[in-house]
Every structure is written in C-alpha cells, then in structure tokens.
C-alpha cells in the first residue's frame, strides 16, 4: 500500500547521454522538505558493485548525491576504494598504501560475488578528469569520503587532491571523521563544499552513555566550523529522538544540514527508520539501495526521482 499523498518530482534534467531515465532515485519530499537519497559507494541498487565508473557517471548525470571513498596509495595520491587491502574488491593484491599509481591503474573491480568486472579501479585524478568531460547535472553532488586522517596527509597528497578536485569543485563535497584532515584538504580548493562526520572513534556510544547530546552538537560545530553538512549515524539520530532530543533540529539551528547513514537494504525495519528520518527532516539519507528505499517509501513498482510524503505512512501496510 502506498503512502498517502505521494507524488513524484523530477529534477530539471533527466538524461544519461541520449537516454532519459525517469526512474533515477535522487530525493523524496515530505511536508515541503527535500531529503536527498545518497548513492552509497556509488550504488543505485542493492546488488550493484561499489565504485563503478558507469554508476558514478550515471548518478552525476541525473542529479544524484553519489558517495565514493578515498584512500592513499604509495605515490601520495588517492584511490577510489574503501578497504586498505585491495584483494577483496579488486583484481590486485597488497595494501593500497604500498601500491604505486601505475599498478593501481592496471586493476579492475570485482562484483559482490568476486567476479572480475570490466570496471577499472579509479584514481581520484582520473575520476575528476572523466567528470570534467561529462555532462554533470547542476544538482549532482559527489561526496569524497576520506577514510584516513590528518596524520596520513603530507604536502604531496594535499597538492594531488587540490589539483584533481579543483576543476569539479562546485559539484563535490569532502567528508571525513577527522576535522583537521577536512581543513587540510579543503583549504586549497576554492568552491569545494565541506562536510564533517563527528561519529567516529566511539563517539556515538560515548554521547549515548552520557546523555549530553547538546554538548555533542556544540563540539561538532566547533570542530569543523566551515562544514555545511554533518554526517550522523542513524542510530544516534533515532536514539536521541527516542529520548526526546531532536538532534537534526539542533544542527539545523546552527545552519548545518544532516546526512543520516547508512541504510544497507530496503527491508521493513530500514524503511520504517527512513520514514522517521524523513519526518525529522533529515537532509540526506545514505543507502546501498536507493532504488529499493525510494520504491518502498512511495509504494511504487519502480523508484522515482523524488516523492512527496504527506499524511500517514503505510507503505508496507503497517
């Protein structure tokens, strides 16, 4: 059963090359508030492999928020990977920090079942060059999630980042759990958008034990004063909500937008959580299954770009 009052909203441009894609899941709207649906690790569907060039290009063409991870390779540049050991996700072997760019460029991604794909492992500068030559939707946003910290950075790495990202800066946002790394990487890149994740290193458990959520908010804002978006574990948002504290509203009061992460699938519990996050006016929800989540929220057989959620949620009949 569909939620009452759901309607579709299409972005201004909906094309990938010459092919119109009216089903791309990019956002939902509830009570006049838009919640972006972020393609975690550049996945549109739950069975997509992570970080494929084809999905990144597609997402950026249709106006999606697309997230990729960055780790440092031996030549002080960045590879679009999550794990430090490349064996699981790629056709290569070794730790990424010990592998030169020339070797990383020879690697291909693996599917979720380990099958090699005709999708190369990307270096940041190669991805930026691809996007600089593609038609990028004005609403598209590429999140570069740096998986290390400031201690891993040096002038060479910072320079590589700046040179790669500057041409596409208006459509990118840098995120990291280390505020110092955020500052080091974004200071030399005019126009890049800035995000910060204060939930690392046991921070969520500590704040929930203490109950002092207001102080957590103040410290996060102070730690990264230029950050426009704050990335929060959905567990923290929902637990705070259960205790009567609207942490999203608290950050909104500081003019920060909120990304709630991560919904890994579009099962009943995840969809119920997504509905509550939308009711709380989350600005973005991170998911590995954007199509499935949007379809479940709208009650549609296939997902739509955006849907307006008004009234009582009863997508799954509850």
Image (cartoon, rainbow, N blue to C red):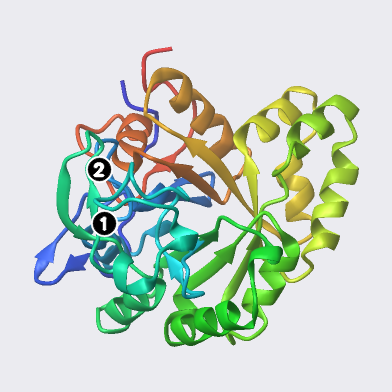
Examine the image and state in which quarter residue 214 appears: top right
Residue 127 position, x and y percent, is 33, 73
Q: In which quarter of the image is the C terminus?
A: top left
Instruction: Name the residue: 41% across, 19% down.
Output: 268
Residue 314 position, x and y percent, is 41, 20
Residue 92 position, x and y percent, is 28, 53
* Residue at which label 1 appears: 52
Q: Which mark is residue 216?
A: none
Instruction: Name the residue: 74% across, 62% down.
Output: 179
Labelled pair 2, 1 in contact (Cβ < 8 Å) = yes
- Label 2: state its secondary structure: loop
How many discs appear?
Answer: 2
Q: Is residue 271 shown left or right of residue 1?
A: right
* Residue at which label 2 appears: 48
> Can residue 27 be seen from the camera position used here?
no
Residue 165 position, x and y percent, is 47, 80
Q: Residues within 10 Å of mark 1 (few under 14, many from 20)?
A: many
Which one is nearer the viewer's eye here, 141 or 161?
161
Instruction: Name the residue: 70% across, 43% down.
Output: 199
Q: Mark 2 and mark 1: span between their CA atoms?
A: 9 Å
> Can residue 146 be seen from the camera position used here?
yes
Name above or below for residue 99 compared with residue 93. Answer: below
Q: Is residue 311 shown left or right of residue 156?
A: left
Q: Residues within 10 Å of mark 2 (few under 14, many from 20)?
A: some
Name above or below for residue 314 compared with residue 48. Answer: above
Instruction: Name the residue: 85% across, 25% down.
Output: 209
Name above or below for residue 135 compared with residue 1. Answer: below
């Amino acid at each position: 059963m569909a939620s009452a009052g759901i309607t579709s909203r299409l972005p201004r441009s909906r094309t990938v090359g010459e092919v119109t894609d009216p089903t791309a899941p990019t956002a939902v709207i509830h009570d006049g508030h838009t919640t972006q649906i972020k393609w975690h690790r550049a996945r549109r569907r739950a069975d997509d492999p992570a970080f494929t060039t084809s999905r990144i290009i597609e997402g950026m063409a249709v106006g999606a928020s697309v997230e990729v991870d960055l780790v440092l390779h031996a030549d002080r540049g960045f590879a679009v990977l999550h794990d430090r050991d490349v064996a699981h996700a790629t056709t290569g072997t070794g730790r990424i920090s010990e592998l030169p760019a020339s070797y990383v460029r020879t690697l291909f991604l693996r599917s979720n079942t380990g099958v090699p794909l005709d999708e190369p492992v990307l270096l940041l500068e190669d991805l930026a060059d691809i996007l600089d030559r593609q038609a990028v939707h004005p609403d598209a946003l590429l999140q570069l999630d740096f998986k290390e910290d400031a201690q891993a950075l040096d002038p060479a790495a910072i320079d590589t980042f700046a040179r790669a990202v500057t041409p596409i800066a208006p459509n990118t946002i840098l995120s990291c759990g280390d505020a110092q790394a955020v500052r080091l990487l974004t200071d030399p890149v005019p126009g890049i958008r800035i995000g910060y994740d204060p939930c690392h290193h046991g921070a969520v458990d500590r704040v929930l034990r203490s109950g002092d959520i207001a102080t957590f908010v103040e410290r996060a804002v102070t730690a990264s004063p230029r950050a426009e978006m704050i990335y929060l574990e959905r567990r923290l948002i929902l637990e705070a909500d259960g205790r009567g504290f609207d942490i999203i509203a608290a950050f909104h009061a500081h003019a920060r937008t909120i990304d709630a992460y991560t919904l890994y699938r579009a099962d009943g519990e995840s969809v119920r959580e997504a509905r509550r996050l939308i009711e709380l006016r989350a600005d973005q929800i991170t998911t590995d299954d954007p199509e499935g989540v949007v379809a479940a929220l709208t009650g549609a057989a296939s997902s739509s770009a955006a849907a307006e959620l008004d009234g009582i949620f009863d997508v799954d009949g509850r």
